[in-house]
Amino acid sequence: MSKQILVTGGSSKIGKEFIKLLPKNIVINNPKRSEWDLSKNKFNKKQLNLIKNSDKIVILHSKLSSKSHLKKSLKDITDQICINLTSIIRICEIALSTNPKARIIILGSESGLKGSYDIIYALTKSSIHKYVEERKIKYKDQQLLCLAPSTISDGKMTLKRKDKKNVKKSININPKKRGINSKEISIFIYKLLFEITDYVSNTTIHINGGKFSRM
């Protein structure tokens, strides 16, 4: 039986680059966002089976808003919380409780460490980081990881930002003098799932080029 991998947010640049790397013997499940009711956390039978039967799950979906917090409606806020936090936890809980071999990687964000102009986005990312660090795996072959990259230079969220000065400032204070690109992140995800030991688990890996070093 072919191994299955589930990728949410696969239409993102990271998702597309990651899928290119996958071996031909793997069944790739890459549903469109319109096929998942992430704002209500409801999954149909087919979606539940995808989660349960995927030995590897890469969660890339999220929602960043350009509105200031006070201009958001209650629905805006609850939708963001559902998409960025509770839908991810639900997917993880289903997988971890039903699949002894589930290996899960979630895309977090530097915003979960330092904050963001989008307060809800930052708080949900911070919560995901904490969930990954505290959610004890039940079976020895399971793995749960979060990657928290700094500025993704070619990411859709970065390219759509209107505060270009802040993006440039963030890059300039980085010791690497650049942001990370989507292909680098996708290669790292691939290596974590297929080449690096699953003993690396329950941690948030900050990928920021040493941006917050102080000494």
Image: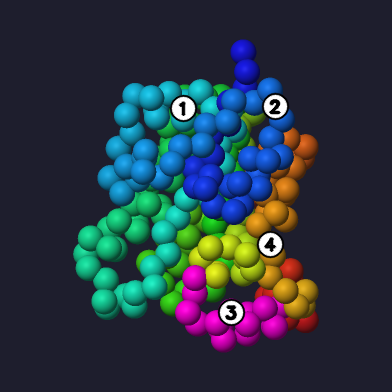
- Which residue position holds label 3? 167
Res. 1 image quadrant: top right
Distance from label 3 to label 1 (Cα)?
37 Å
- Which residue position holds label 1? 50
* Mark 1 Cα shell of 10 Å, populated few (<14), some (14-19), many (≥20): some
Kind of residue at badge 3: Val
* Mark 2 Cα shell of 10 Å, populated few (<14), some (14-19), many (≥20): few
* Mark 3 Cα shell of 10 Å, populated few (<14), some (14-19), many (≥20): some
- Which residue position holds label 2? 24
Kind of residue at badge 1: Leu
Distance from label 1 to label 2 (Cα)?
18 Å
Residue at disc 1, secondary structure? helix
Q: Which residues are drawn in magenta?
A: 160-174
Viewer-nearest residue: 51 or 130? 51
* Mark 4 Cα shell of 10 Å, populated few (<14), some (14-19), many (≥20): some
User: Is mark 4 in CB contact (under 8 Å) with mark 3?
Assistant: no
Which sits earlier in the primary sequence, circle 2 or circle 4?
2
At a point 27% along the width and 63% down the height, the residue shown is 76
* Image-based side of 131 in relation to 120, left or right: right
Residue at disc 2, secondary structure? loop
